Amino acid sequence: MAVLAVKSLTKRFGAFTAVDGISFELEPGQILGLLGPNGAGKTTTIQMLLGVMAPTAGDILYFGKPLAKHRSEILEHIGFSSSYTNLPWDLTIEECLLYTSYLYRIPDRRRRVAEVVELFDIGDLSRQQVKQLSEGEKTRVNLAKAFLHQPKILLLDEPTASLDPDIAAYVRRFLVMQREQHGASILLTSHNMTEVEEVCDRVIILNRARVVINDTPKQVTRSFRKHRVKLVAAHSADTVAEVCRRRELTLRREATSITIDVAHDRIAELLHDLAAAAVTYTDIAIDEPSLEEVFVDLVNNA
Amino acid sequence: MSWHRVYAIVLRYWYYQRHSLERLVDIFYSPLIELMLWGLGSTYMTSYAGSSAHPLVAAILLGICLWVIVNQTQLSVSMSLLDDMWNRNTVNVFGSPLRFGEWLAAIVIVAGLRGLISLAVLAIVALVLYEVNLSLLGIYLVPFAALLLMTGWTIGFLVSGIIIRYGTRVQALAWTLGIVLTPFSAIYYPLSALPGFARTIAAAIPMSYIFEGMREVQTTHTIDPIKLVLALVLNLGYGALALVYLYRGFKRALQQGLLKLF
């Protein structure tokens, strides 16, 4: 059973529709990426999933129970971190985590606080006030807060925003580790497509308030954009062009190379045809399209 | 109701308090200055009128001591919401298992403690500097304090209900709305000193019965129980209305999303 099921979720502000009947599921132990350009409805969706915004229509079910009726019971198992929110400005990091530990009734709270402080390498900051921290440090403290009660589900809005690359890489490894060791299910939003490809089992792309893609990152890139076969074949350029014409493939000629756009499942056929036509090439590269390219295409063509 | 979550919010306000000089100023500085100004002014007047004016001075200073309960309690309730809005922390607070009722219970406890601590400090200062003893009110101090706490909570709920609807642009109400009621509350003078129309308004304000009762106890050591009953009934009525107004404001804010609450 899905740990989170979203059914026809809609949010309207007067005549403006911010989220338009989206449906998706988060499976146990899955890392799901929620992507979309600014204003696509990601943050609105996260707010509704967290119970801090009432949907206009639709259902949100956690562990099979509706959020609207079991809010408090459900939120005990949800961790949340966002770059859009702050922790109490005047409190020290230790105080923030301690009061949060009471909020979630964490047993042996001092030990658990010490653990997350160590996990996110914020020991040196624990006596500092939130207002004294850099953006990257605040993000780490927010993540520590989200993981403090070892939640079953994590809703992470831009979890690596403002982090140095090494810390961001650590956080990505940490998310995967949480999934593997504790079976945590994670829904995250990000603008970093490389990150999404690296950690997510599945991606949902929102555009103009609707789900336009819901698939694995691999399948998304394969289905929505062609691979590029790049050949250095100076003496066989015309033959290559003829093969492509017969297969109805587009190609671009450059000074010394030819680039052919071809679907993943037709690459073998193309190479077979080139060999049959006795095309000789001195170099070949097959570029897999990136999620970022798919994303840009989708947004630009919408 | 989960008391560990209520405790979490109370604990957070204790942490706030520890770090913020402004909050200490709010609790002690302003009430102390007011008490000292009235105390010095009254002492000056006594020097002309003689010892016969001492009961009058005592009544004014007792009024100030009791008024601080309302003022600090309502300020604390309103500030609880404002703190989270200023910190952009509402989503972290209400995106946790915390229920609205638990949040409310926590701010009622914090506000009550703040009101009573302020009262205790002013009572000590009034005794030491002006020989005005709050124990003059005897056992009646208990119902007076309880009723004034209710009034403070009620004003705080009303102010919070307005702020949750209209945002921080109306935050000045946290410091000013309670004060609007003071001329009609008979804190420093008896109701008979008010003009007719003001007395009509005062009749609808629970504080006026309490401060009238305070003066009655001071002079006769007893009180017409009707005053306490009327203050209680008015407090319960206004308190319920203010709570409904705040709760509806919260539900309305949920329509827009609590992230917008700042």
Image (cartoon, grey):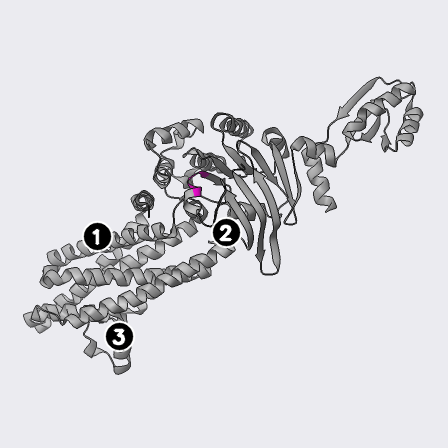
Amino acid type, residue under disc 1 in the picture: Ile
Looking at the image, can residue B188 be seen?
Answer: no
Residue placed at 81% from the left, 18% from the top? A283
What count of labels does the image hold? 3
Looking at the image, can residue B116 be seen?
Answer: yes
Residue placed at 38% from the left, 53% from the top? B81
User: In the image, which is nearer the foreground, mark 3 or mark 2?
Assistant: 2
Cβ–Cβ under 8 Å for marks 2 and 1: no
Magenta stretch, residue numbers: A74-78
Q: Earlier in the sequence, mark 3 or mark 1?
A: 1
Q: Is residue B226 left or right of residue A63?
A: left
Q: Position of residue B43 (x, y in %)?
A: 13, 66
Which numbered circle lies on residue A168? none
Q: Is residue A265 left or right of residue B255?
A: right
Mark 3 element type = helix
Amino acid type, residue under disc 3 in the picture: Ala
Mark 1 lies on residue: B117
Mark 3 lies on residue: B202
Q: Is residue A121 left or right of residue B31?
A: right
For marks 3 and 1, give the CA distance: 27 Å
